[in-house]
Amino acid sequence: MSETPVKATERAPWDGDGAVKPGFFHMGAQLLDAGNTETPLAVGDHLWLKIKVYAKGGENKLHAHPYQDHAFIVLDGRARFHGPRGEEKELGRNDGIFLPAGSYYWFETISDEPLVLLRAGAVMAPDKHPDTRIMPDGEWAVRRGREETFVSADVKYRDGAFYG
């Protein structure tokens, strides 16, 4: 029994004109002496990855993202994550936190060296803006999009110093 040959006009799903291709990225960022930055590494329809760098500070206001599960992994430096009922946990290199949609949190940099985080977010409600935030007073706001790069107004880059 012989196999049916593929016609010249037919292509395997991985070889067609509309075939989905992988994307590659490097986890690198310039270190800071002041301010913070957020740079997209890879953005898909349902998942996105960003590298975030904080000289000091953090996300210092309690908030939740109702339409996304997300996680932070500490690549360098140290952070303290806080929950709404007094929970707190210090995280160092290679430690992480998973925040299901609707989890309230805030965090701060607790090291002298810059905090470098990998942030992964996943869409839970495709018809809603994934970076919608709910503040403790019930206010809803959208801060920025998945593909946006952010550089704080007070940023000061550390000359010639990079993560990755």
Image (cartoon, rainbow, N blue to C red):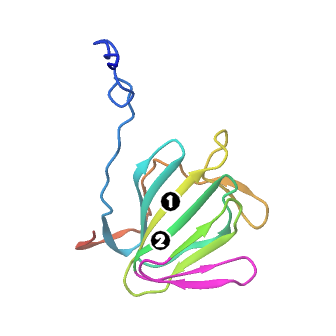
Residue 140 occupies quadrant: bottom right
Residue 43: image location, x then y, percent:
45, 47
Q: Is residue 32 above or below residue 11?
A: below
Element class at badge 2: strand
Tell me what residue is drawn at x 57 percent, y 61 percent: 70
> Disc 2 designates what residue?
73
Classify 23 as above or below 9.
below
Quadrant where the C terminus is found in the figure? bottom left
160 left or right, relative to 134: left
User: Where residue 19 appears, x then y in whole percent?
Assistant: 38, 29
Find the magenta span and give its range: 77-95
Mark 2 residue crowding within 10 angstroms, few (<14) / some (14–19) / many (20+): some
Find residue 120 and name its label.
1
Amino acid carrying label 2: it is Ile
106 vs 18, nearest the viewer: 18
Quarter location, residue 71: bottom right
Which residue in the rendered view is the most extreme toward the front? 1
Marks 1,2: beta carbons within 8 A: yes
Image coords of residue 97 (percent x, y): 56, 73
* Mark 1 residue type: Ala
Picture layout, residue 24 above or below residue 75: above
**Where is the N terminus found, in terms of image quarters?**
top left
